[in-house]
Structure formats: structure tokens, C-alpha cells
């Protein structure tokens, strides 16, 4: 991607987003993009990871939708920890944790950025995914719902910790991409153990979201935390444009040293 879209390395977060894909399955259209303009001082992402986006078509082509471009937007919003004592980002006690105002601003910035991406791609098919550090009904996610994006899977959890369940990692799809879905499932490889017996503290949670499109194989997003570091990937096998992308593009939250924030 153009260096001009990313802030200097010294100003970047210890954790970075990345998009890893299989060239045999998909072909990148144009350059990857970064919302670097919001990652500077005073920007929505000055305290979080810079969002990345890239557009792909199926390398093999074919399928009902041919080689229609599909854009994937990868995110990692500000965490709920390290609460300030005052100001809009303090923990207000409403259950959404600290930095909720920051996460709302980050969601709004991504929503505002997407039209620029879809115009360049010539397609409204968009998947927005990553670690939003927000549960499904919290304020940041409402920004996406208000813009027409929906969860690939509803009323499911992908996160088990301390005997409690929820979803901080999400896969959202645009209305045009939603029309191509036939179903979705979510699960976690971490058992829903009682609080007294939870293994989550020593065996961090891993989660999956599987969704299906018409006449296409299942597509799975997978999220895990390893040694306190977070990463997620999106992959499976399909030969139509959107499915090939969501089958083979891995959206990774890559730790490059330092603490997770």
C-alpha cells in the first residue's frame, strides 16, 4: 500500500493489522489501503490499530457473480482496559467498559471510509471484520448496523472466558453481500466451563464463524488468542468472487512486539 497512507513506523501501534491471501484463489485489485489519516494525533485511531482494506476478485473467475470485486476491511479497535478516571472514555458502569467513546469514533470512521473504497472497487460487496472489542449490542456496533451492515451470524457467541460468553470479534457484511448468504454458524473450541473450572486463563479462547453463500462451500473466520496476543484469519475454498475472497483471505492481527492494547 502507499507509504503515505500509514503513519511513520515509530508512531504505529505495537500490534498491526494485515491481510494475507492465497494468489491461487484471489487476485488483488489495485493497492491495499490504510486509514492512516485517522491514526494520527487527534484521529479516531490514534490509540488503536490502523484499519486496512483490499479488494479482490476470484483468480479463477466464473460463478454466478463472475469476477465481481469484493472488499475486505480489517479492524482492531481500542480495548476495554486501562480506564481513564475522567472524561468520555472512563468506564461509566453501563457494562461497555472503558474507551467506549473511542470505539464509537473508530466505528464511525470506518463506516465513513467504506464509500471511498467501494467507489474505487466498483462494487458494494464488503466484509468488515476483526476484533472490535465490543459486544454485539454495544454502541460501536450500532454504527455499523445503522449503515446497513449485519452480522454474518446472529445470537451466537464466539468467546468464552471465566464461564461467560459473548462476541468481541465480528464478521459484518454489506447488504449486497448479505443477499448471497444462505446461512451462518458460530462456535468456539473453548468449552463453556463453569466459572470455577474455566480453562480460559490458561487456554485462551478460540472462536469460529462459518457462513455459506449460494452454491458455494462454507466460509470460516477463525479468531484466537495465543500467549496474550490476538490474531484472526478468514479462509476456506470457493471459486466465485466474494466466496473466493472470503475463503482465502486471512485478516491477521499481527503482534510485532510490545504489550497488547
Image (spheres, rainbow, N blue to C red):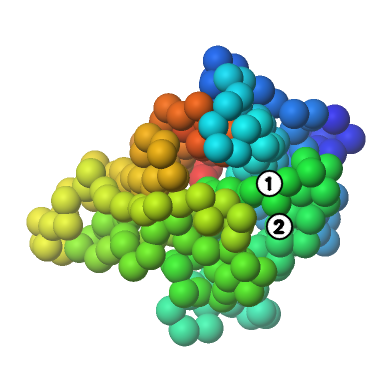
**Residue 39 position (above or below residue 90):** above
Query: Residue 18: x, y in percent?
Result: 61, 33
Q: Is residue 50 left or right of residue 77?
A: right
Badge 1: residue crowd in 10 Å (few <14, some 14–19, many ≥20): many
Q: Which of these two is toward me, 92 or 110? A: 110
Query: Residue 200: x, y in percent?
Result: 24, 50
What element does badge 1 sit on?
A: loop
**Residue 64 position (above or below residue 20):** below
| Residue at the (76%, 48%) spot, across then down | 118
| Residue at the (42%, 36%) spot, across then down | 216
Q: Is residue 12 left or right of residue 23?
A: right
Q: Which numbered dot is residue 110?
A: 2
Query: Residue 6: x, y in percent?
Result: 81, 38
Label 2 with label 1: CB-CB less than 8 Å:
yes
What element does badge 2 sit on?
A: helix
Q: Which residue is mark 1?
A: 51
Q: Is residue 201 visible?
A: no
Mark 2 or 1, nearer chain start:
1
Q: Is residue 137 left or right of residue 143?
A: left
Q: Which of these two is toward me, 148 or 139? A: 148
| The N terminus lies in quadrant | top right
Label 2, label 1: how many angstroms apart (C-alpha)? 8 Å
Q: Residue furthest right?
A: 4
Query: Residue 28: x, y in percent?
Result: 69, 26
Q: Quadrant of residue 29?
A: top right
| Residue at the (41%, 39%) spot, across then down | 215
Amino acid at each position: 500500500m502507499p507509504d503515505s497512507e500509514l503513519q511513520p513506523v515509530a508512531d504505529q501501534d505495537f500490534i498491526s493489522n494485515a491481510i494475507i491471501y492465497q494468489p491461487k484463489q484471489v487476485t488483488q485489485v489495485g493497492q491495499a489501503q490504510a486509514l492512516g489519516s485517522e491514526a494520527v494525533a487527534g484521529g479516531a485511531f490514534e490509540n488503536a490499530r490502523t484499519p486496512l482494506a483490499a479488494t479482490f476478485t476470484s483468480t479463477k473467475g466464473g460463478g454466478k457473480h463472475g469476477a465481481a470485486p469484493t472488499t475486505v476491511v480489517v479492524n482492531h479497535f481500542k480495548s476495554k482496559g486501562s480506564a481513564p478516571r475522567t472524561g468520555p472514555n472512563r468506564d461509566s458502569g453501563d457494562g461497555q467498559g472503558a474507551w467506549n467513546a473511542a470505539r464509537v469514533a473508530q466505528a464511525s470512521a470506518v463506516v465513513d471510509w467504506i464509500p471511498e473504497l467501494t467507489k474505487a472497487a466498483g462494487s458494494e460487496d464488503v466484509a468488515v471484520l476483526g476484533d472490535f472489542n465490543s459486544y454485539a449490542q454495544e454502541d460501536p456496533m450500532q454504527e455499523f448496523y445503522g449503515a446497513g451492515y449485519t452480522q454474518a451470524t446472529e445470537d451466537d457467541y464466539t468467546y468464552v472466558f471465566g464461564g461467560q460468553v459473548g462476541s468481541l470479534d465480528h464478521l459484518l457484511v454489506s447488504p449486497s453481500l448479505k443477499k448471497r448468504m444462505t446461512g451462518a454458524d458460530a462456535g468456539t473450541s473453548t468449552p463453556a466451563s463453569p466459572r470455577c473450572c474455566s480453562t480460559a486463563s490458561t487456554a485462551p479462547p478460540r472462536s469460529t464463524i462459518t457462513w455459506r453463500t449460494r452454491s458455494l462451500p462454507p466460509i470460516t473466520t477463525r479468531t484466537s488468542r495465543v500467549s496474550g496476543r490476538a490474531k484472526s484469519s478468514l479462509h476456506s475454498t470457493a471459486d466465485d468472487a466474494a466466496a473466493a475472497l472470503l475463503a482465502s483471505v486471512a485478516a491477521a492481527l499481527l503482534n510485532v512486539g510490545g504489550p497488547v492494547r
